[in-house]
C-alpha cells in the first residue's frame, strides 16, 4: 500500500501528541507530510482532518463520516476514549478498533501519490466502496460461501493462463469483517495480479485457501508455483478495502513460490436466544441479522426457556415482557440472579415503556418496540461485542 503502511504507526503517535510542543515527528512522517517541526505537523494534520470533513449529502453512518468524527473528537478536540465512545454509542473496545481504521484512512490520504490521471478513478472506487458499506453496515461474510463463488468465477481465467488452480474449502465457522461483494472482488483481483504475464511463463500451480491466524484474523491465502512476478500484487480497490476494514496484506516470494495473504478481522457466530411469542417478529429479527455474526434461536414461551438456554448456550438473550405464560419481569429477575444465567446479557425488547425498571432488574439493554434493524444490531453489539473481532 505504498507509503501508507510506513506512516500509519508514526501518524497514530503524532496524533496522540498533536498538542505536545516537545514532540518530534518521525522522519517517515515528516517526509510524507512535507514538514520538519512539531508546529508544522500540527498545522498540517489539523488542516488535513478539517478538509476531509464529509459534505451534507454523505450518509450519517458512512465510514468516511464515522472516521472523520473519530479523528476530530479524539485528536482535534482532545476527547478521551470513554467520552468519544459514549458520544458514538459504542464500546471503548469497538472505538479502539474504529480509531485504528480511521488513522489508516487518514494515512491513505496522506500517502496517495500525485497521480492526477488516476485520481478520478480512485475517487470513484472510494464512492463505490462507501455505497456498499452504507448499504451493509457492519457486514460480515461467510468465507466458505465466498470461496465457492470464486471457484466458479475464476476457473476460466485460470485455464486461459495455464494455471492449475485448487480452491480449498473454508472452515464453516469462519467469518470475515467485510461485505461479501468487496471481499470477493479483492480475491479475484489479487489472483489476477499474481497470475498475469501469461505469455512469458509456462504452466503453474496455484491454491486459494482460508485460515484463522493466532491474532484472530481471517486470512485468505494465495500460493503460486512457480511465481510469475516478484512485485507485490497491489491494487487500489484491494488496498482501500483493507484500510477500511483494518486489514493487512502479506507478500513474499521464496525460491519457486509466491505467497500472498489478505488478512481481515475474523468473526465467530454468536447465538442470540429470542424469547418472543410473536412468530412474525422472529422472522423480522432473523432477517435483521442476515449478513452479521448473530444467529437467532427462538423460544416462543417462558415454559421452554430453561431448556432452550441449556441446549443453545446463548451469547445473549432478547426478552419480551408480555408473554402468554409468564411475567417477563420475573423471568428477567431470575435470569439475573441465577448462577447459571447471570453472566448472559439480557436485552429487554417490549412495548412496555419501562427502561429504568429493566435496568434496575438487571437488563444489559432496553429496546422499545417497534425496533429498527440498526437499533437491534447496535444493541447486540453493545452487550455482546462481535466474536473474534478486534473491538
Image (tube, rainbow, N blue to C red):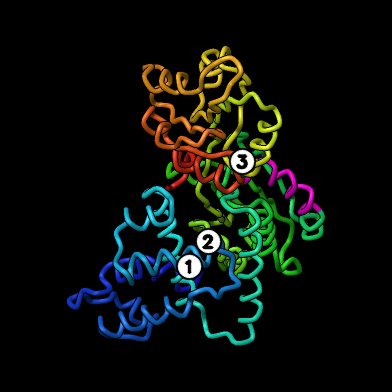
As measured in the structure, the alpha-carbon distance from the residue carrying label 3 to the one carrying label 1 is 36 Å
As measured in the structure, the alpha-carbon distance from the residue carrying label 2 to the one carrying label 3 is 32 Å
* Residue tagged 1: 105
State the image quarter where residue 187 is shown.
bottom right
Q: Residue furthest front?
A: 353
* Residue tagged 3: 370
* Image depth: mark 3 or mark 1 in front: 3
Contact, mark 3 vs mark 1 (Cβ under 8 Å): no
Residue 225 visible to an observer of this rendering: no
* Residue tagged 2: 244
Q: Residue at x 29, y 67 (%)?
A: 78
Mark closer to the chain start, 3 or 1: 1
Is 360 situated left or right of 251 in this image?
left
Residue 243 visible to an observer of this rendering: yes
The span picked out in magenta is 141-155
Query: Disc 1 on helix, strand or loop?
Result: helix
Q: Is residue 30 above or below residue 341?
A: below
Question: Considering depth in this image, is 23 or 258 the residue closer to the camera?
Answer: 23
Mark 3 surroundings: few (<14), some (14-19) or many (≥20) residues within 10 A:
few
Rendering coords of residue 381 (x, y %): 49, 43
Q: Residue at x 52, y 39 (%)?
A: 367
Rendering coords of residue 2 (x, y %): 49, 72
Q: Is residue 298 above or below residue 131?
A: above
Mark 1 surroundings: few (<14), some (14-19) or many (≥20) residues within 10 A:
many
Rendering coords of residue 333 (x, y %): 41, 21
Amino acid at each position: 500500500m505504498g507509503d501508507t503502511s510506513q506512516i500509519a504507526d508514526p501518524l497514530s503517535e503524532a496524533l496522540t501528541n498533536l498538542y505536545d510542543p516537545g514532540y518530534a515527528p518521525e522522519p517517515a512522517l515528516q517526509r510524507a507530510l512535507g514538514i520538519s517541526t512539531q508546529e508544522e505537523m500540527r498545522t498540517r494534520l489539523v488542516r488535513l482532518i478539517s478538509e476531509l470533513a464529509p459534505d451534507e449529502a454523505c450518509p450519517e453512518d458512512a465510514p468516511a463520516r464515522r472516521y472523520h468524527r473519530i479523528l476530530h473528537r479524539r485528536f482535534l478536540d482532545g476527547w478521551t476514549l470513554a467520552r468519544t465512545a459514549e458520544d458514538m454509542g459504542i464500546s471503548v473496545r469497538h472505538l479502539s478498533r474504529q480509531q485504528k481504521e480511521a488513522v489508516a484512512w487518514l494515512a491513505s490520504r496522506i500517502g496517495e501519490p500525485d497521480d492526477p490521471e488516476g485520481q478520478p478513478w480512485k475517487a470513484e472506487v472510494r464512492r463505490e466502496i462507501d455505497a456498499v458499506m452504507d448499504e451493509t453496515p457492519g457486514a460480515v461474510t461467510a468465507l466458505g460461501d465466498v470461496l465457492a463463488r470464486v471457484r466458479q468465477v475464476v476457473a476460466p481465467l485460470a485455464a486461459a493462463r495455464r494455471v492449475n488452480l485448487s480452491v480449498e474449502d473454508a472452515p464453516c465457522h469462519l467469518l470475515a469483517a467485510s461485505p461479501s461483494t468487496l471481499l470477493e472482488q479483492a480475491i479475484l483481483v489479487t489472483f489476477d495480479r499474481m497470475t498475469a504475464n501469461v505469455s512469458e511463463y509456462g504452466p503453474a500451480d496455484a491454491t486459494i485457501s482460508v485460515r484463522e491466524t493466532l491474532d484472530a484474523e481471517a486470512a485468505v491465502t494465495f500460493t503460486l508455483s512457480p511465481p510469475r512476478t516478484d512485485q507485490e500484487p497491489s491494487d487500489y480497490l484491494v488496498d482501500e478495502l483493507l484500510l477500511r476494514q483494518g486489514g493487512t496484506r502479506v507478500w513474499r516470494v521464496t525460491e519457486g513460490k509466491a505467497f500472498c495473504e489478505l488478512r481481515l478481522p475474523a468473526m465467530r457466530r454468536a447465538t442470540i436466544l429470542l424469547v418472543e411469542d410473536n412468530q412474525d417478529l422472529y422472522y423480522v429479527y432473523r432477517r435483521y441479522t442476515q449478513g452479521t455474526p448473530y444467529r437467532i434461536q427462538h423460544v416462543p414461551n417462558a415454559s421452554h426457556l430453561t431448556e432452550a438456554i441449556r441446549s443453545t448456550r446463548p451469547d445473549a438473550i432478547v426478552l419480551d415482557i408480555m408473554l402468554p405464560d409468564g411475567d417477563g419481569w420475573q423471568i428477567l429477575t431470575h435470569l439475573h440472579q441465577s448462577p447459571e444465567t447471570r453472566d448472559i446479557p439480557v436485552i429487554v425488547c417490549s412495548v412496555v415503556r419501562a427502561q429504568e425498571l429493566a435496568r434496575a432488574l438487571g437488563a444489559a439493554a432496553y429496546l422499545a418496540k417497534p425496533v429498527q434493524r440498526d437499533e437491534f444490531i447496535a444493541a447486540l453489539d453493545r452487550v455482546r461485542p462481535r466474536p473474534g473481532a478486534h473491538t
